[in-house]
Each structure stands twice: as C-alpha cells, then as structure tokens.
Image (spheres, helix red, strand yellow):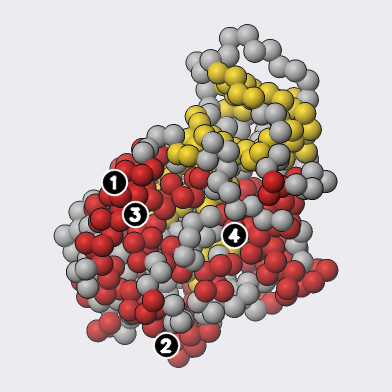
Amino acid sequence: MSKILIKNIACIVTCDDSDRMLKDASILIEDGLFKRISQEALDEAGCDEVIDGTGMYCYPGLINTHHHLYQIFSRNIPDVQNMELFPWLKYLYEIWKTLDTEVIRLSSLTAMGELMKYGCTTCFDHHYVFPHGSGDLLEAQFAAADELGMRMYASRGSMDLSVKDGGLPPDSVVQTTDEILKDSQDAIERFHDDSYGSMHRVALAPCSPFSVTADLLRESAVLARQYKVRLHTHLCETMDEENFMLEREGMRPLAYMESLGWIGKDVWYAHGIHFNDEELKLLADTGTGVAHCPISNMKLSSGIARISEMVKLGVPVGLAVDGSASNDGSSLMEEMRVAFLLQRLRYSNDAVSAYDILKIATRGSASILGRDDIGQIAEGKCADLFMIDSRRLELTGTDLDPSGIFGTVGYKCPADLVMVNGKVTVKDGELCNIDEQRLADAANTKCREYLSKN
C-alpha cells in the first residue's frame, strides 16, 4: 500500500461539488486515491513520500477530450496554413496514408508528453486513420501512454467513404463496414476497462458524417451500446459540413445523427460550433456532450462555439486541444485562456468565467467521458493533479484568485509537478518516466522520414 503526503500547499482549487478553495492545506494519497484533503496538519507517519507544497497552487489534472495524436508529425506545414477544413484534410490525407506503428508510437509519446507537461493527466485520442497493413496502432498508443504514465482513453475510429464514394480520404485508409465493426469489437474486448480508476478505456468513433456511411454510424451505435462504451465523432464544425449534409441528406448534421441513434448521455461531439437554438436545447435535454476546441476552431476559421450558452442550458461541455496539425500544439493550459477570451469576445458580460473554463477542463471533461472518478480533488477520487509555483515571476500578483489564473493571466510554463493515479509523472517541469531529449531526437528523425515519403 503506497502512501504519499503533499503538505503546506498554498492553495488547493478542488473543483469539487462545493467548489472549495483550501489555503494552507495538505493532501494524503493512498493507493492512487485521495484519502484526505485538510487544512489541518496531517500525520507524516507511515508515508512512503512527503512532498513539500510550499508556495504551490494545486489543481485537478486536466482532461483532454479530443485529440489526433498522430498529427504532431504533420504540424507547421507551410502549404496548409491558410486552408479551411475540407481542403486542409484532402492535402493531409496524402501524408497520413503512410502511417505505421512507429509513427504512432513516437507521435503519441511526443504529443501526450507535451500534454502532460502542461497539467493534462487524461487524454482521449480520436484515431480514425488505419492504412492497410499499418499494424496494431491502438496497441502502440496504449503502450506509449503506459510508458508516460498517462491515463488513456483511445477510440477505434473509422472511415468507409473514400474519394471515389464521395468522401474526402484516399482508398488506402478506408475499410468496409464489416471490417470496421470486427476491429471495433476486438478493440473493446482487448483494451476497454470500465473499472473505477481505470487507465485504459475505449470509445467507438467513426470520423465524421461526411466520411462514413449511415450503415456504419448506425451499426457502431448498436455495437457501442451492446458493450456499454461511448460514442464520439466530429459534428457541426464548419458551414461546409452543414451544406454538404443538407445537399446529400436533406437535413442538418445533428438531425441526421439523431436519426441514426447518435444522441444521449453516451455520445459526445467534437467542435459543435454551428448548432442552432433548437439543437442546443436537444443536446441539453438528452445530455449529449460537446468537446470544445477553441484554438483549432480559430486556426481553421471554423467559428466560435456557443459555449457560454451551452453551459447555461446544461449541455455537458469538455475542453480539448484537437489534433496537433490544426492547433499546432498540445497544451490545455493555453486552450483554457483562449477559450475564456473567445467567450468574452462573443458574449461580454454573459460569458462563462475563468473558473468556469477550469471546471470545463476538469469536471466537464470527466463528465463527457463518462467518468466520475477523475476531474476533482475530493476524497475517494483518483489522485490526478498538477501544481504550479505561485512564487514565479510570471504569477506575481495573481494570489487574489488562483482559480481564474489560466483564463485571465494565462500560464505558459510547464507544471512544476504532475501526478497521475498517485504517481509523479512530471517533476520540476520535466517528464519523469522518459528521456525527453532522446525522445525528441528519435521523433524528429522518424518525422523527417515519414514526411519524405510524400
């Protein structure tokens, strides 16, 4: 039984049911769970490790609800910097069709490593590109997460509409519906763990309504509910998508998805920028979630999501960085500030607060992933947290409201300490379980080789 005490913490922003902020407090962790959170001194006797939290602000681990980890090897490409989504995708599919297990392993380590350094402890990845003969890509992702100590929520994504069928991707990265369903079932049975505090989970995630058939969407929903796993896809990201669906199906994207069973508490959509008033009410009434990706939405000129309205209506909302090729980074700390400022720009005094954005990145994100064991610092929950040193020059004058720092002031430094499941994974801003320079060298070498094929 492991026992860790973090003492003398300047302020704990718990994000718990009571929104407590505890000054001069301590946390006792046992077997990967928060055992006690107290402003009284806690006994050090029997502790395997005692960590001094003097001067530190402590927060629940951030939870990323939509990513494409492999895209870190196709970011900062000059040719696509001024493209919107559809032409951007068509260009990059020609690169992505050469993915293999080593690209996936190294890009996953790199992207999740960056996420973790900036306070993220759980990552959901929407992987939907499975080139023929590319190997066991999900296994490579879970192995990378385990090496870093990241809590991983992977998806068995899919596409069955290629260019010749009226979709966007090349033939070499699409599969038949039967192949996809077989692989999806296999992924669930091999990797999904729905136990409390699990480190591995799987969702089913066909790419988007414009790259898959109605049959695949319908059958994926049936399979997901048979196995009690969640459903995810891109939706209402651009006006191009809306126009495409109106022309092809004669209905708006959400109505189309609802007709195929894609609505409810076990479903969350990435982006959700172009929902109308009636659709927002439907999302709220059914508990259907939205992963907000503000930087990606700006980069691709897609629009500003109606997050402040969603929160007031009760739509479940989480935060996400989206793929590295449309961001082009992996920091939820940066995402929080951009999210806050975009809502201020659109809604002024009716915007969500900076603390609301932190709650979206923690409790909200946990909710749309269907997890009640992470996202807050509370007794009995998983010991996922990060700490930053309030004595840094960059945080001078911020002590009036530690809960709002990430939205109002912003924070660009790596976390001083990150803990996942009661284990330290980042210390003094550096990853603990991997040699960062060796990883960077190997990843850059593989990235150049990968890009040279195109």
Q: Say whether marks 3 and 4 touch (CB < 8 Å).
A: no
Q: Which residue position is annotated with label 4?
A: 335
The residue closer to the viewer here, 6 or 176, is 6
Q: Which residue is mark 1?
A: 139
Q: Is residue 350 left or right of residue 156?
A: right
Q: Nearer the viewer, mark 2 or mark 4?
A: 4
What amino acid does circle 1 point to?
Answer: Glu
Q: Work out which residue is located at the far bottom of the displayed protein and give it.
A: 247
Residue 221 % position (x, y): 42, 61
Secondary structure under the numbered disc 4 in the rendered image: helix
Of the residues under marks 2 and 1, which one precedes in the sequence?
1
Return the disc, 2 or 4, that comes first in the chain's sequence: 2
Task: Give the distance between the C-alpha atoms of the residues marked 2 and 1, in whole angstroms.
Answer: 36 Å
Left or right of 438 in this view: 250: right
Instruction: Work out which quarter of the rendered image holds the C terminus and state it.
Output: bottom left
Query: Residue 448: x and y, percent?
Result: 26, 62
242 and 422: which is toward the camera: 422
* Amino acid under disc 2: Arg
Q: Earlier in the sequence, mark 3 or mark 2?
A: 3
Residue found 24% across the figure and 53% down from its top:
101
Q: Nearer the viewer, mark 2 or mark 1?
A: 1
Q: Residues within 10 Å of mark 2 (few under 14, many from 20)?
A: few
Q: Which mark is residue 107?
A: 3
Q: Is residue 191 visible?
A: no
Point 46% across, 82% down: residue: 82
Answer left or right for 62 relative to 348.
Answer: left
Which residue position holds label 2?
A: 248
What percent of the width, then of the height, locates residue 118?
54, 48
